[in-house]
Structures are given as structure tokens and as C-alpha cells.
């Protein structure tokens, strides 16, 4: 696992944090948050909060009392114990793109299929830069809608041995994810002892938590599974055209959502989620990799630490329609701040393209390269007398070169970052080799990963039980 | 001018700074620095430093005494007073790519010409993101070698009204640059009162300052023109394969070079230069946009502040052979740390491609987009009660949208960064418009800049005098 021991880049003053605190306090007190699930409203009412229909008006101090119950750090168990992850502190956990209905492969954009879904699971398994198999890595449109979550969870569980994200389309889907996790991990007691899934609960911003998402949240929190409570904020559409106003709204939404999980099960693991960008005010299109999203991300990290909460943000986000220069710079424009902020859980860390509508194989490899570079960059330097290599200077002197120096010869294999995808070939050689740009070179890398892929071993009895569960439930769901 | 009022990202402990200080002190004391110009050696000798042939062994405290003479901040005057720049403090000055023998335009790579040189001057003039017209924006291979510097300086002076960089190929070329600057700015006294040029003096690392560069440095420093003393460090070739060792060497070279300028003329304006990356240890190719170069850059900024020196570093550096995804992410991998470090003078800020062998028109526009985004990103947020836009929340409530809110309507034109190059078009529309990737879209942007270009006005008598100077000197140089 990657531990980010570099300094955090913090840009908010204490005074600014105070303004934002007053902001969310006023929102939850005066405007309230809508919870479209009677059981949720009832939990808040019983805890002494004022409710009007499905709108909950919270005492901010009550919200903070609930937040105080949240574990600062926790583990998510993988079926391969070496792949168990730690959420919180200096640790960073990376998970692939989530949600796209389309895929892009070798320049062709098409509907995503279950075969794509499985292939992306295999890529997540093959690259150690990803700690998680993912969740809705793409939406497999060729699988029946009611039961595809069974195939997806089965793929995550069997094609990889990493942690995975739970399905949140409905309470039913969440229950199926939990039941299958019980099979894989040895029963309810085992998964309640240490969470084995992490699931994305999005807010229907502004200030509304929808019923189906809440149904899933109730199931996961009751089973002590981790949930990421994420305001979905494209400024200009789901929040005001002001970063401070959006941060205050993000807190009002996330903190009340987190409080709800604590009402469902005190001490259950949660993550403060952030998905914050802006729309293009001319066209209404969502924009990613923007300066605003980078600023929002840096602020979110600092705010999360202020409230003692692990947080999710960032990833390799871009609006670009192809894995081109814009895709490169926009992704890094979010991913570098993701590291600067010390983000604990990073969704969309690989494969995101076209504003999240597309899972791209080529872009997956671009993002893996970025993750590798940033892991290297955010590893502190060791600076001591030995690192000064004075002997090398004595050996080389003035105007010479260090290529053959003893200090160099001892270290040349490991001294620098070695790229996976980037090319520094001289022009003539690059041209002779086909003059391939980055996207084209990426293809050979994922093809090789598929060739080298080996399915991680799984106990036959467990696999059979999972298969039987999928078959039975598919029948029950009428597919 | 851009003022970076965001926090600096500093990664070195006081202890680490101490180790690096001991490192350069030991190098200048025990190994010494070679100065391949007798007058330079003589200046050090007369100042009480030990010399052996052309190697100067410095007392580190003597070096620090010279460094203490350096102005912390200074101005460089442009012929258009609104374009005069300030070097040092929180200010950042951006200058285009420097040095490439080739250009890339619409996918074709070819020898650079004087026509290319003039067109890049025009682009530098057209984009306010660049504060400087540049220097050797490309090497005009169709102009006679001995006199092309005259044409280049004339182009910088007449096609733009921004500051420009002086020619450093020889003392003669430096004298011509200074003479032409005297004509443009009203005589020697005027340019000595406030510098009007800034020039790049590279070290032939390790630990050797070459004669021709020193000849140019002597001319510029004597005329009180700014010089950027820059160790040229590709780790593994010109320095050890260790970042701390390279930083210590960078200091030994830069500080002795700066001390020399102070011996030539105490108080003359200098900039601590850094050009620090690494080679690929397999092929020997130089690599840019690497994690190592980003770390080196962040350290350099902190070190420069420690010694109270304005510094140069960073830019939009990449090894990529084309303006593709790698060019996008590698450039930002250097350019974002350039801002995090608060770099005072940024060379190669636009147009750099293929390890600096190519000036690319498309890449110039990519970099301008990055500069625009980063200027926006590194402008501090104003966080106060008004920015919380509570009225917008009251207006929109739960589950609605902010597109038509009064707060939005009042601000929608200016609330977010508006891209120059990046596209967030939906796929169908993008495809209908030709499915152009970033590099292709960049072409329309620079073509438009050429169409809109207007040569900045210049007094006829001054222009005539410059033309006469160029004609006379060209004849004298035998071209």
C-alpha cells in the first residue's frame, strides 16, 4: 500500500475554515437536508432532530457528536490478506473508474459489455498501482438490468483478489453484495468484524439523499461495511457558482449522510466523499480537470482532516473525448492535487475518459503511468551525508561525466523512476519504430497484461457456493 | 504580471538544508570549480581565493558574502512600460522555449528557420500568459551563423514590446545585444539604471564554466543586465544519480557563478538557475517531466529562498516526440511544481517538445492553456460570508438546480475558468465537428493569433538606427 509521507499542501486559513463551518451549520439548521426514506427521517426524529415531512433540520452540534463516533482509520479486508487495505491516516487507496456506459478501445467508442467489465477487472488485478478491483468499472449493457449486479460482484470476487466496491442501485442489490461477501469471507460475523466492501453513496445534490441510495446505505452500514458519502457537485448545476458555497454545501450533505450511518450503526466505517467540479456555463457540459476542481480538492482534504474523517476525492478526471494531450494534462491536474491533499480513497484513478461516460483501455494505462510517477514523486527523499556522493565528484571532477562513475554503476538499475508508457526515444528511432503516440503505445501494454493475467486461486467450494447463489438469485429476479 | 500568493510547497527539513549546505561547501572547498576564462580566475584570485590553473577553490563564507550583494528583487524594463516585469518575491515571469534546432508544425518536423523564429516572436507577443518575448525560441538554421543573433535580437525588439533574452553564444554577441538594447532604450546609462535584458549562462556541468559563456556573462554583468546562472544537470550524465548530490552540485556551480557576477559588478542582478532532470539509464536519453525533476524543482525553490536569491526553474518540459498525452502530462508534471515552488523566472514555459530539440506550434498552445489554468488555480480563494451564497441555497432548496438562480445569473460569465483549448463538447457534437484532438484544435488557435497579430508601434528613428546597426555589423561579421 502507498503511504504518503510527504507534507500536505493546505491553502485554507483557520479563519476560512471557520467561515465554512458557519456555512454548513446554517444550511443544516435553516434549510435542512431531505432524506427520501422514512426510516432515515425517523432515525433523526428519534435522535431529537426537528423534521418536516422528509426534510431533517439538524442541530450542528448533534451532527458533530455523530461524526465523533466515526473511526478515524479502518481496514478493508481483501480475500488475499496481502491486498487488505487501510483507509485513513497517510495511506492512499486507489480504485478504477466508476460508472461509464461506454468503452473506448483502439479509437472505437461503443456500448460497454460484460466482457469489457471482466477485462477491466483483469487489468485492475494486474496493476499493483490499483488497490481495489473497482465497482461499476463500466456498465455492462448486454447483461439483464435486474441481475447484472450479481455477475459484476462475481467478477470482482473471482477475477481479482483485491477489495471491491458494493452495488448501490437498490437495497436488494446491496443485500446481494453482502450475501456474496459473506460466502467469500466466511459468514456475517466475519464481515462485520472487519469490513470487506466499500460502497459509493451519492447525494442527489443539492441537499437531497435519494431513497434507493439510502436503502443501500442502510444495508451496508448495518453490516458494518464502509460507505463513501459523496455529494455530487458540479458547480453551476448542483451547487452555487462559488467554491466556498459549494464546500459548505458539501459539508452539509456529507456530514448529515455520515451522521445517518452512525444512527444506523454507531462506529460503522464511513468516508467523507467529494466529487466536485463545475459545468461549462456556456454549454452546460460538465468539465473535469479544471482549476476549480483542483482547488476544491485541496480544500476538501484540509476540511476532512479538520473533522477527523478519512476522505475520498480526485482521480484521473478529464472531459476529453480521446486519450490525447488534454486527457493527459487534465487528469494530472486532478491527480497531482489528489496526492498533494493526501487523499485516502481515490476513485476514478484509472480509465476515466469523456467526463466519465467512457471507460478507456488506453487511458487506463496512461493513468497507471501517472500513479506510478506520483507514488515515486511523493516518496520523501533521504538526505544524508552518504546521499551527497562526494566520492563521485572526486572521481569525475570538472567537465567530465558520471555515466561510468562507480557511484553510478552501483545504482543505475534503480536510481530513477522507470516509465511504463512514456517514451524518451530519439526521434529517428521512434519514427523507425512506427512513430507511435502515447495512446497507441498503451495498447501493447494492456494486451501484454491480458496475456500475463492469471486468475487468482479460489477454494472450489466457495466458488461453487457463489455460482449457486448467482444462479438462484438470477432466477428469483426473473432474468 | 502574475503574483503567486498561494502557499509554497516545501519538502526539505532544516536538517536536510544543512546537509545540502555542507555538501556545496565541501565541493567548492575541496574540488573547486573550473572557470575557463583567465579574467574570471584573476577576479577570484584578487579577492583572496585559492586558484590552481583555471580551478578556483572558494572559501564558502566568501561565496556567501558575494551572494549577500545580490538584489533580492529587481525589474527588467520592457519598451512598453506596461510589460516591464519584476523578478523575485511572489512574482512569476514566463518565457517561451529556448534552444531547439527543429520545429514541429501540423505533424511535420523540420529545420527551424528565421521565419519560424519571427512567428514564435509573434505568438509570444499575442499571448499575455508570456511575459517575455523569449531568447533562442528556435535556432534559425537558414540564417548565417555569425550574424543570425542580430536578426534574432531585431525580431525580439521589433515584433514584440515585451522583455527579451540576450544572446550568449560569445562576448561579441552579448556586446551586440547590449548595443542594440542601448539603441532601443536610450543609451548605456538608461540600461544600466534598470536592466532591459535577461540572459541564460549555462554551466558546462560538472563544475566547469566555459569561456564563451563567461565572456557573455562578463559583458552582461558589467552592463548591469540580468543573468541566470544555470547548472545544466541531467543526473547520471552531468551529476551523480542522487538528487541530494545533484542539489549540492547545483549550489556549488550556481553560487560560484553568481559570486563571479558580483565580482564583475557588485549588486548586478542575477538569478539562481536550475535545469535539473535525469537521463534514462538504459538508453542515455534525457528524460523530462520526471518525478525526479519535480522533486528537484521543489527543493530548488526552497533552497533559493533560503539563500535569498530569485530563481529560475521548471517550464513545460517533456520527452515526447509529439503533442500527445505524454506531452500533456509530462509538461504539467513540471509546470504544476513550478507554481507550487513559486518560481520567479520560468523558461521553456511554452512550445517545448521532444526533450527541447523541437519548438512546436501546437505544443505552444497546449502550454498557454496550462499557464492559464495554473494562474487561475494559484489565485487564492476569497472565503467570506458573502462567498457562501446562502441566498442561492434558500432559492434552490432540495434536489433542484442552480442554473437559473439569481446568484448564478449575476456571475455566470466570469465565475469559472474558461478554456482556450480544452474541449468539454459532448461526443456527438465533437464527432460532428471533425473529432479533432487537442493538437489539431491548437492549430486553429495559433492561426487566429497570427491573423490578429499587430506589430507594436516603434519610433521610426529608433527602428532605422537598429536596422543600420544590424546592416553594419552583418557586413563587419562577413555575412
Image (cartoon, coloured by chain):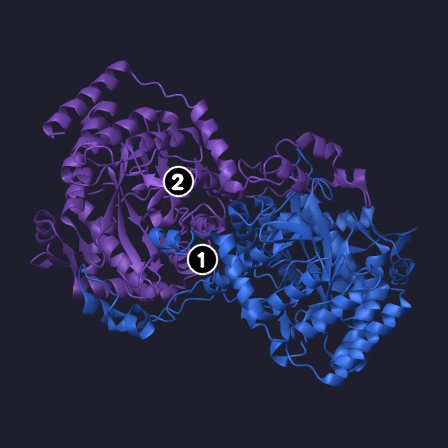
Chain colours: A purple, B blue
The disc numbered 1 marks a residue on which chain? B
| Relative image position of residue A160 (x, y in whole percent) | 35, 27
| Residue behind mark 1 | B422
Residue A424's tag is none
Which residue corresponds to the image point at 48% horizontal and 53% vertical from the top-left?
B438
Q: What element carries label 2?
A: strand
Which residue corresponds to the image point at 72% horizontal and 51% vertical from the top-left?
B232
Q: What element carries label 1?
A: loop
Q: Residues within 10 Å of mark 1 (few under 14, many from 20)?
A: many
Q: Nearer the viewer, mark 2 or mark 1?
A: 2
* Placement of the N terminus of chain B among the 4 image quadrants: bottom right
Task: Tell me how far mark 2 sits from mark 1, CA to CA.
Answer: 21 Å
Which residue corresponds to the image point at 52% horizontal and 48% vertical from the top-left?
B329
| Residue behind mark 2 | A108
* Relative to A180, residue A430 above or below: below
The residue nearer to you, when weighing A442 against B255, is A442
| Relative image position of residue B390 (x, y in whole percent) | 25, 69
Q: Residues within 10 Å of mark 2 (few under 14, many from 20)?
A: few
* Relative to A418, residue B290 above or below: below
The disc numbered 2 marks a residue on which chain? A
* Placement of the C terminus of chain B among the 4 image quadrants: bottom right
Residue B130 makes an appearance in the image: yes
How many numbered circles does the render carry? 2
Q: Quadrant of residue B307?
A: bottom right
Amino acid at each position: 500500500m502507498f503511504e504518503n509521507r510527504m507534507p500536505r499542501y493546505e491553502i485554507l486559513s483557520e479563519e476560512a475554515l471557520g467561515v465554512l463551518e458557519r456555512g454548513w451549520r446554517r444550511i443544516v439548521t435553516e434549510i435542512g437536508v431531505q432524506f427520501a426514506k422514512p426510516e432515515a427521517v425517523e432515525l433523526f426524529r428519534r435522535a431529537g432532530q426537528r423534521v418536516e415531512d422528509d426534510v431533517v433540520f439538524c442541530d450542528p452540534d448533534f451532527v458533530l457528536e455523530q461524526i465523533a463516533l466515526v473511526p478515524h482509520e479502518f481496514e478493508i479486508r481483501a480475500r488475499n490478506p496481502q491486498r487488505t487495505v487501510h483507509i485513513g491516516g497517510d495511506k492512499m487507496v486507489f480504485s478504477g473508474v466508476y460508472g461509464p456506459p461506454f468503452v473506448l478501445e483502439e479509437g472505437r467508442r461503443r456500448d460497454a459489455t460484460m466482457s469489457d467489465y471482466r477485462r477491466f477487472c483483469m487489468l485492475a488485478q494486474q496493476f499493483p498501482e490499483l488497490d481495489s478491483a473497482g465497482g461499476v468499472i463500466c456498465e455492462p449493457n448486454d447483461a439483464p438490468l435486474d441481475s447484472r449486479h450479481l455477475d459484476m460482484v462475481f467478477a470482482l470476487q473471482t477475477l481479482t483478489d483485491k477489495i471491491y466496491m458494493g452495488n448501490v442501485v437498490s437495497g436488494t442489490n446491496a443485500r446481494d453484495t453482502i450475501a456474496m461477501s459473506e460466502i467469500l469471507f466466511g459468514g456475517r460475523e466475519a464481515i462485520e468484524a472487519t469490513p470487506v466492501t466499500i460502497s459509493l453513496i451519492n447525494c442527489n445534490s443539492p441537499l437531497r439523499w435519494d431513497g434507493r441510495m439510502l436503502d443501500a446505505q442502510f444495508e451496508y452500514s448495518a453490516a458494518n461495511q464502509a460507505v463513501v458519502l459523496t455529494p455530487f457537485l458540479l458547480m453551476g448545476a448542483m451547487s452555487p457558482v462559488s467554491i466556498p458555497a459549494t464546500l459548505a454545501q458539501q459539508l452539509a450533505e456529507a456530514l448529515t449522510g455520515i451522521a445517518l450511518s452512525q444512527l444506523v450503526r454507531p462506529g460503522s466505517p464511513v468516508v467523507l466523499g467529494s466529487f466536485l467540479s463545475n459545468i461549462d456555463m456556456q454549454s452546460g457540459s460538465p468539465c473535469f480537470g479544471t482549476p476549480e476542481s483542483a482547488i476544491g480538492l485541496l480544500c476538501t482534504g484540509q476540511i476532512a482532516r479538520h473533522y477527523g474523517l478519512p476522505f475520498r476525492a480526485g482521480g484521473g478526471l478529464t472531459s476529453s473525448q480521446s486519450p490525447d494531450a488534454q486527457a493527459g494534462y487534465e487528469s494530472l491536474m486532478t491527480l497531482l492535487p489528489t496526492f498533494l491533499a493526501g487523499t485516502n480513497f481515490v476513485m476514478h484513478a484509472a480509465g476515466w475518459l469523456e467526463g466519465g461516460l467512457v471507460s478507456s483501455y488506453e487511458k487506463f494505462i496512461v493513468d497507471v503511468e501517472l500513479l506510478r510517477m506520483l507514488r515515486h514523486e511523493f516518496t520523501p527523499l533521504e538526505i544524508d551525508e552518504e546521499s551527497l556522493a562526494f566520492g563521485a565528484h572526486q572521481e569525475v571532477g570538472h567537465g567530465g561525466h558520471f555515466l561510468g562513475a562507480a557511484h553510478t554503476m552501483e545504482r543505475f538499475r534503480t536510481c530513477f523512476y522507470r516509465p511504463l508508457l512514456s517514451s524518451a526515444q530519439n526521434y529517428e528511432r521512434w519514427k523507425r519504430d512506427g512513430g507511435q503516440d502515447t495512446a497507441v503505445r498503451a495498447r501493447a501494454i494492456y494486451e501484454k497484461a491480458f496475456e500475463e493475467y492469471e486468475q487468482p486461486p479460489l477454494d472450489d467450494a466457495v466458488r461453487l457456493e457463489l455460482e449457486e447463489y448467482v444462479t438462484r438469485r438470477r432466477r428469483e429476479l426473473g432474468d
